[in-house]
Image (cartoon, rainbow, N blue to C red):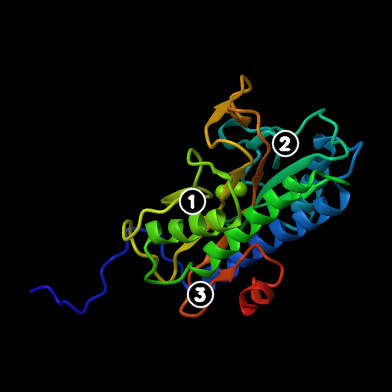
Amino acid sequence: MINPLRKRRSRYEIKTPEQFVKMREAGLVVARTLTLLEREAKAGVTTKQLDDLAKEHIYDSGATSNFLGYHGFPGVICTSINEQIVHGIPGAQVIEEGDLVSVDCGAVVDGWHGDAAITLLIGEVAPEVAALSEANREALWAGIRAARAGTKLGDLGQVIEDAVRAAGDYGIVEDYVGHGIGTAMHMDPNVPNIGFPGRGDELEVGMAIAIEPQLTLGEYDTVTLDDDWTVVTSDGSIAAHWEHTVAITEDRPWVLTAEDGGTEILQSA
Ligand code: MG
Ligand code: MG
């Protein structure tokens, strides 16, 4: 006879509190690497220079990179400028005044993965570009607030979509979504950035997910360039990208890739 009180085995990787502590170590390496890059990214710097700084910092921290060599990816970060949405390859491209640069970074400590992205505004940018990035960041944090046990993934997507729609007329990229994370960077489930009300599996205590909305000033369609990596907007519009790795706990979400664990923002209204 099946005991109805026995906990159903999850379809997803469930972490113990001790394993979350390990993931936190990886998350902090990512957070501190991105803080370093935020300081160093300025007009005249190449994206390769940022990658070199990130690589040194990740390995000096006792971590390794989950980006480097991933399906042959040559960097430890992705740098996506202006109409580039995600997966830009660091290289000779020089960052210029007025650019929007999204930087995606990951790290591994003792086999546990972290993954986060920030969008940087270089010098004076157009007001609508600054608003785009802010709307994207706000939508990420709206999703983080909803990342609690019992929330269905389609409802989490709705929270993100609602935050975007409230902020303005932005394209929400659908081709690239968030994901489970833990002993690998990309695991089930997919974490959508648009709503599927009442649908999808429920988040459970012990799951970790990367939430990563990507917004554009135009349409949501994407094109991959001939380098087989760089994803750009099909209409050439500017795109932003913000991401955090989030642990689902008995209590509030633990933002593993935020230096303060998300405390400051999550405690504010
Ligand atoms: Mg990422
Ligand atoms: Mg990710």
| Three-letter amino acid code of the residue under disc 1 | Asn
Compared with 206, 222 (above or below) is above
The percent position of residue 9, horizontal first and vertical second, equals: 28, 65
The percent position of residue 148, horizontal first and vertical second, equals: 45, 71
User: Closer to the observer: label 3 or label 2?
Assistant: 2
Quarter-of-image position of residue 47:
top right
The residue positioned 81% from the left and 35% from the top of the image is 48
| Three-letter amino acid code of the residue under disc 3 | Pro
Label 1 belongs to which residue?
193
Query: First in sequence: mark 3 or mark 1?
Result: 3
- Disc 3 to disc 2, C-alpha distance: 39 Å
Residue sitting nearer the eye, 100 or 112: 100
Compared with 21, 194 (above or below) is above
- Disc 2 to disc 1, C-alpha distance: 20 Å
Where's the N terminus, which quadrant? bottom left
- Disc 3 to disc 1, C-alpha distance: 27 Å
| Three-letter amino acid code of the residue under disc 2 | Asn
Under circle 1, the secondary element is loop
Label 3 belongs to which residue?
17
Dot 1, how many residues are within 10 Å of its Cα: few (below 14), some (14-19), or many (20+)?
A: many
User: Closer to the observer: label 3 or label 1?
Assistant: 1
Residue sitting nearer the eye, 22 or 211: 211
Label ID, residue 82: 2
The residue furthest right is: 44
